[in-house]
Amino acid sequence: MCDTDTTERRPVIRVVDLVKRFGGRAVLNGINLEVHPGETIVIMGGSGCGKSTLLRHMVASLFGDEGRVELLGQNLNDLNESGLNALRLRFGILFQSGALFNSMTVGENVALPLREHTGLDEQTIDIMVKIKLEQVGLREAADLMPSEISGGMKKRAGLARAISLDPEILFYDEPSAGLDPVTSAEIDQLIMDLSGKLGVTSVVVTHEMDSAFTIADRMAMLDMGRMLKIGPRSEFEALRDGPETGDETGDLIRQFLRGDPEGPITARRLSTGYEEDILATAGE
């Protein structure tokens, strides 16, 4: 977890007035966010809220229509492809599925970044692969194919590959998705262990609340492309456990955190004009 003085240091990620439109619709609408060195920040929100799109901007696979993203002190908009590739070597990504290459063994998957981006000899690479797999509890699975391991093991193998180049930042896209509760808890513990042992900054996109409240130092909630709230985990815990106040934003966040079936989120869905939508479609 993060040190107590991280807020005093320069952010490793800054998102400033970020706007992204698809088909004229603002998927991200003026997003501002800072991520501090060594902390674990959880970005959460319902399906379609923009959290995965925000993550894609942070890793330079998308670029905004307005605003900017700064990563490790560099404005992504100012970098050419060579500069972006150099910067990408300084962070790792755990994709939702693990994204292993099915034609390679687990060990070969972890070795791939080392072979592609370093001048290390094969003996050293083999040692590094064993170290990385040991860090995620998978050293015994090095010679297995992805088809021979479970979903949770695939996530851990993907994480071993993500840390193979000793990144400064780790990005996680729905790390607990599709996992049973025990395996999900193991992944959460692994995220916390790696953050503590490696001192990396972690950005986790999730809508799994048990996981979020376990691993987060700070939390950020998106809704319909807007940033509703950013704050320490304790503030979100107080909001989750407190009574309704009549404040629409606060009550919306509280409903999401609790998973309540009734509240501002469901009321908004019910007021979208279902009958009018059906009639308009029938008239086309």
Image (spheres, rainbow, N blue to C red):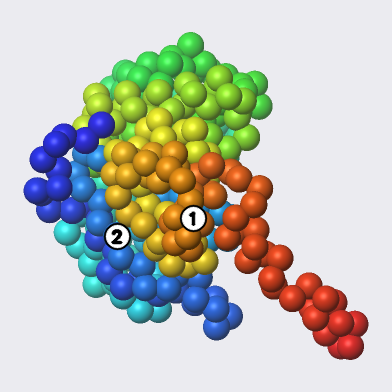
Q: Looking at numbered disc 1 in the image, what kind of residue is underneath it?
A: Asp
Q: Nearer the viewer, residue 8 or 15?
A: 8
Question: Between 196 and 130, which is closer to the camera in this rendering?
Answer: 196
Say which residue appears at 53% left-offset and 34% top-offset: 176
The label number, if any, that marks residue 251 in the structure image: 1
Identified at 41% across, 35% down, the residue is 213
Rendering coords of residue 163 (x, y %): 34, 33
Q: Nearer the viewer, mark 2 or mark 1?
A: 1
Residue sitting at x 62%, y 35%: 178
Question: Would you say residue 67 is visible in this rendering?
Answer: yes
Identity of the residue furthest to the right in this view: 282
Of the two numbered discs 2 and 1 on the same chain, state the one appearing first in sequence.
2
Q: Secondary structure at mark 1?
A: helix
Question: Which label number is shown at residue 33?
Answer: 2
Question: Is residue 16 depicted above or below 261 in this figure?
Answer: below
Closer-to-camera residue (102/14): 14
Residue 92: x percent and y percent? 35, 42
Q: Is residue 23 above or below residue 205?
A: below
